[in-house]
Amino acid sequence: MCRHGELGNGPSAGMERRGLLMSKARFEVRFWGVRGSIACAGRQFDGFGGNTPCIEMRIGDHVLVFDAGSGARALGPQLIRDGIKSFDLFFSHCHYDHIEGIPFFDPLYRPDMNVTVWSGHHVDGSTTEDMLKQFMQAPFFPVGPEVFRAKLDCRTFHAGETLDPYPDVHIRTARLRHCNGSVGYRVEHNGKAVCYVTDTEHPETGLDESIIDLIRDADVVIYDAMYTPEEYEATRGFGHSTWVQGVALCKAANAKQLVLFHHNPRHDDDALAAIEAQASECRPGTIAAREGMALSV
Ligand SMILES: [Zn+2]
Ligand SMILES: [Zn+2]
């Protein structure tokens, strides 16, 4: 069995679990929340982590954050400690597990912070501003986004558009097949590409060709591996995918590293270790994302 299937062992070839380096050429990915649907606590989840999606990319001098699930709560103080004064926050979509960390994200309360907020999943003409206001409102939440003191620059795009937030960072997007819409991202820098593709379901007829196109030849593919194939039989139509489909996608697209993500809250550490072992047997180098894990691309 491939060593990458063993829980707690080192990550795959070319990747290192280590601190983020200070370098113009750096392309670092750190996982602050890897769980899907709902945060979960308990020792049985400690190995992989219980917080919902939040991924930080440090690319050259830039900080890009993808989704603000409950993992954003711990990322916030780290950004402030590191003296970050501006960053970009991209949303895949606004299901609760991807936004529930917004009101608890410390940088948003800092008047010296500039945050560009991006979303492009909307299917009803809503904007990024609408998303924030509709989430933080009575009677579901005690205060609205007017409590934030950071300078927020909200941008709304259409899934499928390309984004160029910086001259040296190019982002392609694709609409994913998910209830109420979701966006997959391909982030390119210095000849490298990392894809963030979560909350998506394939058509009955086979793999979603638009994802294959998005992740083609990518260095890292972070992918919705919510279900096992057996579980998927009972959850068809819920808008999620399986690790087997992740393996097939990376093979079809000649992508290098598959990182299983959006872990099912019903899967404890033992279950996820077993999934990781099976997946890495099928596609050597595959790993399951762990909270706190960092990859250097
Ligand atoms: Zn989700
Ligand atoms: Zn979702």
Image (cartoon, rainbow, N blue to C red):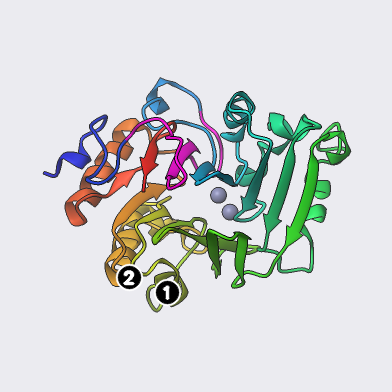
Residue with the most extreme bottom position: 205
- Find out whether the residues at labels 1 and 2 contact each other: C-beta distance under 8 Å: yes
Position in image of residue 220 (x %, y %): 36, 54
Q: Quadrant of residue 49?
A: top left
Residue position for label 2: 253
- Dominant SS of magenta comes to loop
Q: CA distance from mark 1 to mark 2?
A: 7 Å
Q: Is residue 177 above or below residue 19?
A: below
175 within the magenta span: no
Magenta span includes 29: yes
Q: Residues within 10 Å of mark 1 (few under 14, many from 20)?
A: few
Instruction: Identify which amino acid the numbered label 2 is placed on.
Output: Ala
Image position, residue 237 (x, y; %): 52, 64
Amino acid under disc 1:
Asp
The quadrant holding residue 21 is top left
> At which x and y percent is residue 55?
52, 43
| Residue at (24, 44) in percent of width and height | 12
Secondary element at tag 1: helix
Kindly identify the residue that appears in the image at 49 percent across and 55 percent down: 198
Position of 129 relative to 201 (above/below): above
- Give the magenta range: 17-40
Is residue 111 left or right of 287 when viewed as pictured? right
Which residue is painted at 56% across and 34% down in the image? 71
Residue 157 or 290: which is nearer the viewer? 157
Q: Nearer the viewer, residue 180 or 182?
A: 182
Residue furthest to the top: 43
- Vertical side of 33 occupied by 283: above or below: below
The circle on residue 213 is: 1
